[in-house]
Amino acid sequence: MKVSELSRRTGVQVPLIKHYLREGLLPPGRATASNQAEYGEDHVHRLRFIRTLIGTRGLSTGATKEILEAITAEQEDLHQVFGIVLGVRPAANEEEAGNEPPAEAPERASLGDARRLIAEMGWEVSQGNPAAHTLAEVLTALAGLGSDIDWHSLLPYARLADGMADVDMRQMSGERGLLAQAERAVLVSVLLEPALLALRRLAQEDKSARHFGGDGPVASDDGAHLADSAD
């Protein structure tokens, strides 16, 4: 296909496609003339993946190029591909793993609690996984509010997350090729997150109605429409 068809298929404007070609994110097409080239389905998939990284994950062109190069360098290691997409960079050695940014005493204590939870779950995670620091920040905030929710309280949620991760891995199985694996990793780790949060909100309303609502949930006009559609 010509670049105009590639643009139509992917929804990416031609000037932006040419920018990705110049930056080396998108491989060149097969030259058919001095200033013309043809593109194939691989270009469609790669271009959609580039737009997902830049548009959905909010990465820069440079960071996206780095990820694409790193994925190619991993040579069929799906675990590393998944880690690259998630932004997890395993420490190269113990010295690197020990070089953490300085933290205030409460944050450091909460990071220890986060690691206790990880150890309790038996999870094998890298020192550089940013999710551990996010967990520590939440635990710090909870402690600052005087909440009785601590890392022990999060264990039931961790077990649910462990089950969801099993589903994620099953969703990724069977893919062939590095780019297809990376695309699937983005799908299950990034694009599905809003859907998972939406499902939790729907389930929370249902459980609240069953446990606390005497007459069931109060339906808005939209809620009534959804109920009518389901009948």
Image: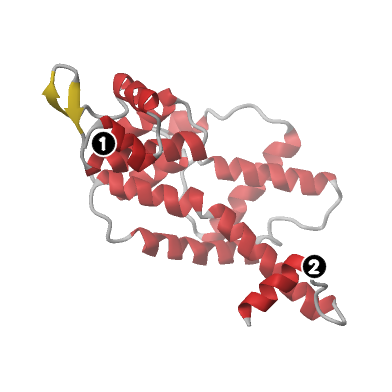
Q: Quadrant of the N terminus?
A: top left
Q: Pick whichever of labels 1 and 2 is earlier in the sequence.
A: 1
Query: 69 or 225, which lies in front?
Result: 225
Based on the displayed image, in which of its 4 quarters is residue 222 positioned? Answer: bottom right
Query: 122 or 88, which lies in front?
Result: 88
> Residue 164 appears at what percent x and percent y?
51, 64
Residue 45, relative to residue 14: is it above or below? Answer: below
Based on the displayed image, in which of its 4 quarters is residue 70 positioned? Answer: top left
What residue type is disc 1 on?
Thr
Q: What element carries label 1?
A: helix
Indicate left or right for 39 with 52 as reference.
left
In the image, what residue occupies the spot 86% across and 82% down?
A: 215
| Proximity of marks 1 and 2: CB atoms separated by less than 8 Å | no
Query: 227 or 184, which lies in front?
Result: 227
Residue under circle 2?
A: 220
Indicate left or right for 213 with 41 as reference.
right
In the image, what residue occupies the spot 34% across and 35% down?
A: 7
> Residue 38 appears at what percent x and percent y?
18, 32
In the image, what residue occupies the spot 74% across and 73% down?
A: 224
Crowdedness of circle 1 by 10 Å Cα count: few (<14), some, many (20+)?
some
What residue type is disc 2 on?
Ser
